Amino acid sequence: MSAATTAKAPTGVWTLRARGFREFARKFARRSDGVLGFVILVFFTIMAIAPQLFVGALESAITASGDGLGPPSMTHILGTDELGRDMLNLTIHGARVSMVIGLLATVITVVVGAVIGIVSGFVGGLTDSSLMRLTDFFLVLPTFVLAIILAPIILDMIGVDAEVAGLRATLVVIVIVIGITSWASTARIIRSQTLSVKERMFVDRARVIGSGNGHIMIKHVLPNVMNLIVANTVLVFAGAVFTETTLAFIGLGDPFLPSWGQLLYAAEAAGAPGLGAWWLIAPPAICVVLVILGFTLMGNALDDILNPKSGVRR
Amino acid sequence: MGGTYLLRRLVQAILTIVGIVVLNFFLFRMMPGSPERILLRNPHLTQETVDAARARWGLDEPVPVQLVKYLAATAQGDFGYSFQYRGQPVGEVIGNRMWPTIILVGIAEVIAIIFGLALGAYSGWKRGGNVDRVGNGVSLVLYSMPYFVIGMPLIIIFAAELGWFPTSGMLTPGATYASPMDQLLDFLHHLVLPLLTVSLGLIGGYSILMRSAIIETRTEDYVTTAKAKGLSENRIVRHHAFPNALLPTVTIIAINLGYVVAGVLTAEIIFNWPGLGTLTYQALSVRDFPVLQGVFLILSIAVVMANLGADLLYGVLDPRVRT
Amino acid sequence: MSGPTFSSPMRPDESARALESEGRLVGDESIRDEADGAGSQDAASVARAAMDAEAAEVATTRGRRWTLPKDADPNVPLLVVENLRTYFTLESGTVKAVDGVSFTLRHGEALGIAGESGCGKTTTALSLVRILPSNGKVVEGSIKLMGIDLVGKSEKALRRYRWRQISIVFQGAMNALNPVQRVRDQIAEPIEERLNQSPDVARRRAGELLELVGIPRERGKAYPHELSGGMRQRAMIAMALACDPAIVIGDEPTTALDVMVQAQILQLLEDLRHKLGLSLVLITHDLSVIAETCDRVMMMYAGRVAEEGPVSEVFGRPRHPYTQKLLAAFPNIHADRRTLDVIPGSPPDLRDPPPGCRFAPRCSFAMDVCTEVVPPEVTFDGVRVACHLYPAGSDGTPITVPPGPAVDAGVAAAPA
């Protein structure tokens, strides 16, 4: 009885993938907002992976191809920045920086958040209440200001010359800082779901067999919260890009490997708004908004499909 | 309302604030270099100030003692000394810059709550209707825009190109005013664009929140009952759907206050609005940590208090919580 | 409505308000203004004088005095539903939830509508006052309330009949009551809004209604979550009576309650029905409830009527195979069988129902004609049946369905 019972236990999104991927794809295709988001993201992912399809190598102050603050023209479709670099070039290369930072930060956020959420929800008791205290603490903090304070500390810790995935130290710092400050929301959501999964019988059955906590959490709980994690990850990605842009804007970015936020920081520092130099602002701004919007739309669509709420229409 | 509930939340709030002060303490010590060197590196401090600080914070003594002294000093309002402002106490520096931010955020929140919640409720109720499609779309876009991304186009269009509003500042620099009314008008003139920026950012979020809350509420049985009673649609929304939809909305608004803070700070920067935002920006550029930590502490306290207020408000709105 | 408040002499303006609050003057909300001017001592004559001449017909049924709506026909049955079809539009297709349902409800009658979940009973009830979700629509049929067809009415015109002529007591009153509003305010709400009474009068009336259903008046101040399940259900009943409707629909009103409370609520409904001359439509899947409280019963299956007639007939001599199976599926404490009858299979998907009789796939007597032709409704001795076993012209003797594949009650009870 025991082996058969465990084998019969539904396994969330793994089963969904095996049996119902086409079903999922069909449902997703009906969501025009989700599809729009998906298209936007594919577009920018291509831009991030292969900028050379669109423009040449990233221009620097030395290899700037135009005159300073030149408005859009035939040679420079999106104009040039204060150092004479082509805005189209900068914007397209910025995609990689923004997206990679976003991706790495999201990985940290979701992993930390999910681990804490599942452990806290499953183990319960003192572990749960202390972890939840910690989570609530982080939820209340104005994480933005905390990020600003943490940045130099972490920079000091990892050393100025560190490099990860082609990102230099300053940007690695941003990744870590976003991760540290954003996990709390994910942890809360995952914990909630873990609690309801815990109630279900098959987990008890596994326990009766004598599986250890860790085994149960990985083999049984995790697959069942996976749906939620997936939807949440996409939304976290949106938040990560949002935060990265803001942190870069406030001065924590890298001028040599500019993300869109960094480009906006440079624009602000050059006084672009007051000068009416909209071409410095519009390209990175529009890209940022599109990417965040795209992730948000797709995340909402995924959430609706994977986690149908009981708002049943009678 | 349950007195014990209130008390518990108050105690939690205080503990959180204490936790933040402790966090600040350790953060300071984790700064590159020791506290003393950072303090001493500041050429603007007089020797007396340094000695006073050393004594107050017990910089030569073991860490637990230092912590206690730090907590005591903070409780008395001693947040350290600013690096860039010639050793001025951080408390003073921050105090000077608080009001512009409070005014900006306060008014923006009021505007956003009124318009955002109303738009969200209407959109959600008439789901799929014209107002919903436009309103929800616009809200989603606004929600995806960092506040400074909302503000920059506003500056370019309305300040730089059309010249209707000033591009920066709270008051015209170097201006003299014939009367207090003139100063007030100048102030309001400068307030419009920053206020519009922050309000739009908030409206985006609140509208989406309320919309989904109303959509959920709409399928509840008590709304069906209200409809079966033959009540007007107006009454059903105002007395049944909206009050119930408000509950999760208030909760989520409270949780997101930390992010609102971030948004407002960046909005201030692009307008050079002399509040905590520009203060943070400047402090960051010169690595003025005492000021940064002071801002962190003040903002944390503000968010904690706001959360507490939201809890109390929730108790008023939802009778199920009161017992 | 009978009760001490309205039978004692009162001031002239109050009496007009009282009669108005009896929910009679549908379509005429200005009565109060006219009544205020009258100075006569005789309460009844003042009220009558103030009434709109067109609506002045007064009918008396079992002790109730109520005025019919403007176009009402006093000579027809209270509610006549003919060929009702309500469909829901989903992404995946159209659900034919109610597909040709007809029935009649007479004054003071209690009709039970029974069937499995999803057979369309609740949808039928909601269709009467058109409180369907946005993807639902009455596509065909007529609903004649006192001769007035509700189907053709606009939303605004229909609203007038809601709660004042037909009210509903929903299942699971926890969610059917607004959690942030006090109970007495919810009961007073339709009195204030629909009958144009002042808040004080409305609240007083709400208090009376609470006492009528057995809840102490002071408990009205409570919020729904502070009441027990049984009290909440009583409160819902009080609320349903607020505008003195002609028909009260109970949608599984006792399902969520334990047996003792269930009995009390049913008894309450019975008492109220006789005291107030109400007509009742009771929707439930529990046949024993219908057997206790109802005069007639209508068995529904997959959106259609299987059998309908007096309870004693339908339960005593069931004709339709579905009725027989459903009756047999109920454990009988007195029977000597230790096995339960289970109907194999499950109800059809109403997006694509089978042609012909919808019960045919699960019927042990299914014939070829059953899967091709929709069985017509034929009446025998006052019982209406839709089954090819009883064609028009036959003598209508019930054909007993043999006990089907049985499940041993002992094994069924053990946890899987």
Image (spheres, grey):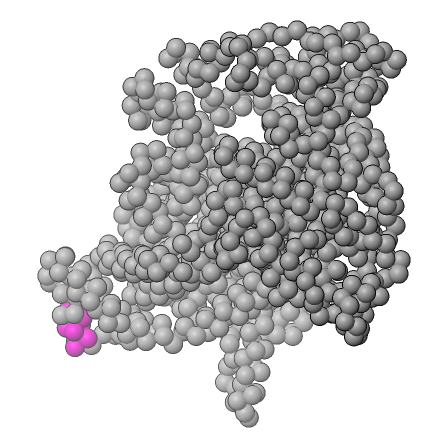
Nearer to the camera, C233 or C12:
C12
Nearer to the camera, A259 or C354:
C354
Q: x and y percent of residue B137 in the render?
A: 66, 50
Main secondary structure of the magenta stretch = helix
Q: x and y percent of residue C26 in the render?
A: 80, 55
Residue at the spot 62% in from the left edge and 12% down from the top edge: C344
Query: Is A75 above or below relative to C377?
Result: below
Residue at the spot 79% in from the left edge and 31% down from the top edge: C103
Residue at the spot 24% in from the left edge and 57% down from the top edge: B22
**Residue C176 on the magenta span:** no
Q: Which residues are magenta?
A: B47-54
Nearer to the camera, C74 or C241:
C74
**Residue B53 on the magenta span:** yes
Left or right: A272 as drawn, with respect to C372:
left
Seen from this angle, which residue lies furthest bottom? B178
Image quadrant in which the C terminus of chain C is located: top left
Q: x and y percent of residue C54 in the render?
A: 89, 58
Q: x and y percent of residue B120 in the render?
A: 62, 55
Residue at the spot 71% in from the left edge and 70% down from the top edge: C11
Q: Quadrant of residue B65?
A: bottom left
Does residue C370 show up? no
Q: Quadrant of residue A110?
A: top left
Query: Is C160 above or below relative to C261?
Result: below
Give the mark count: 0
Left or right: A42 as drawn, with respect to B73:
right
Does residue A4 show up? yes
Left or right: C72 as drawn, with respect to C207:
right
Nearer to the camera, A226 or A204:
A204
